[in-house]
Image (spheres, rainbow, N blue to C red):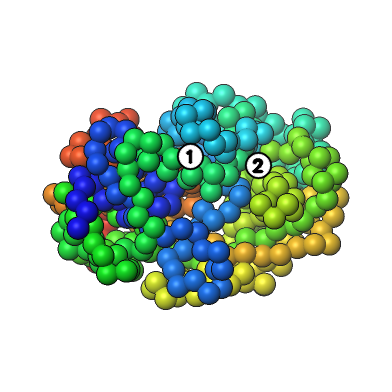
Amino acid sequence: MKTVDVAVIGRGLMGTACARHLAEAGHSVALVGPDEPAEPARFGGPFASHHDAGRITRIIAHDADWSRLSARSIARYRDLEARSGIGFYTACGGMMAAPSEGPGAGFGDAFLSVAAAEGIPHDRLEGAALAARFPMFRFAEGTRAAWDPAGGWIDPRAMRRAEEALAMAAGAEVIREAAVARAGGSVTLGSGGAVAAGHVVVATGGYAGMDALLPFRPALLVYARTVAFVEVRGDEAAALSGMPTLIFVPEGQAHDLYLLPPIRYPDGRWLLKIGGEVESPRLTDAAGMTAWFRGAGSAEAGRTLLGQLARLMPDLPMARTSTGACAVAFTATGAPYVERLDETLTLVTGGNGAGAKCADELGRLGALAATGAELAGEGYGCDFRTVRAVEAA
């Protein structure tokens, strides 16, 4: 049986970042989790939402702690790229936009307030200035926007590879299997093998509490989300080269959507992606999560998203569209769960739809918690405490 100081279960963005921070601090680390499936429709799980080519990154947020998490992560992107030799960050700018009146106005008030309070460099845009700066969009009258020059998008697969390459360079071992059980510091693998560790970090995203690795179920609402894609030609993508990433609240709606500019996917296609749903099905067990990821999302949700995109970008050719499956895990506190639960176990989960961009900082906090450090002095307003499902009931 392999024995290490820390076994990190979950080779997603948070888990892999946590393993890197632990390994670079001198701890022996095993990073446990399967590779991305080559044939998702036949894979038995676990899946991950980072199996994609684009995620929004930005410092501006509707909440100061999420802004700080992102700022600290983004500040390390270029170092991660340089040391790993793997590029993943495109700083095309990130924008948040919301109406000045109506059900979505509070969202705009929140992100503009955070930008001012945190001193985040940004351009405030509205009216004719907003239309002239980003003519590809048709916002409703009265829309307020903030453009963040540090924003843009990351390739989450590439960022995870960069974190893993640096973790391995620091001595971490990668075990490409799913963990199926845990007892104290002993982790049982799907093959029947085991890893023995002084401490275990569970970073399994929405699966946390569904996967027999925790002694209780954390309060997580896990939703089956659909993303929609529009394929454009190379010249059409070039014409949109000035397009930022965007989080926006459509007129008359309280819920925000997100949009990424054309990104070249591994199969060579240029795809714009839109996501965000007012309501979507709950995922309550691992079997349901696996079944969802084997498919391509909801056709109805995809049509709704594409309808919103057509209103926002009426000049966008939309002859070729598709959908995909995603999942989002929301905590009871609105903040991530990063907590040392006992002497053998730490939990790191709860991206709340915003975790990819700040995964490196969440991994760093997870590494601190796993080694017994307090997070109270890290400069955040929240305590990252885990709420158990029974507490939230």
Residue 179 falls left or right of residue 137 = left
- For label 2, the crowd category at 10 Å Cα-Cα, with few meaning under 14, some 14 to 19 and many 20 or more, is many
Q: Which amino acid does label 1 sit on?
A: Ala
* Label 1 element class: helix
| Quadrant of residue 317 within the rendered picture | bottom right
- The answer to whether residue 104 is above or below residue 321 is above
**What residue occupies the far front of the structure in this picture?**
1
Residue at the spot x=38%, y=73% of the render? 285
Is residue 252 or residue 51 the one in the foreground?
Answer: 51
- The answer to whether residue 334 is above or below residue 114 is below
Q: Position of residue 103 (x, y in %)?
A: 60, 53
* Quadrant that contains the N terminus: bottom left
Residue 131 falls left or right of residue 171 = right
* Label 2 element class: strand
Residue at the spot x=32%, y=30% of the render? 379
Residue at the spot x=26%, y=51% of the render? 7
Q: Where is residue 152 in the image (x, y as percent from the top left)?
A: 62, 37
Residue at the spot x=74%, y=53% of the render? 269
Residue 214 falls left or right of residue 317 = left
Is residue 136 or residue 368 the one in the foreground?
Answer: 368
* Quadrant that contains the C terminus: bottom left
Which residue is under mark 1?
162
**What residue occupies the far left of the structure in this picture?**
343
Q: Is residue 304 visible?
A: no
Q: Where is residue 373 in the image (x, y as percent from the top left)?
A: 20, 36
Please give the label number shown on residue 245.
2
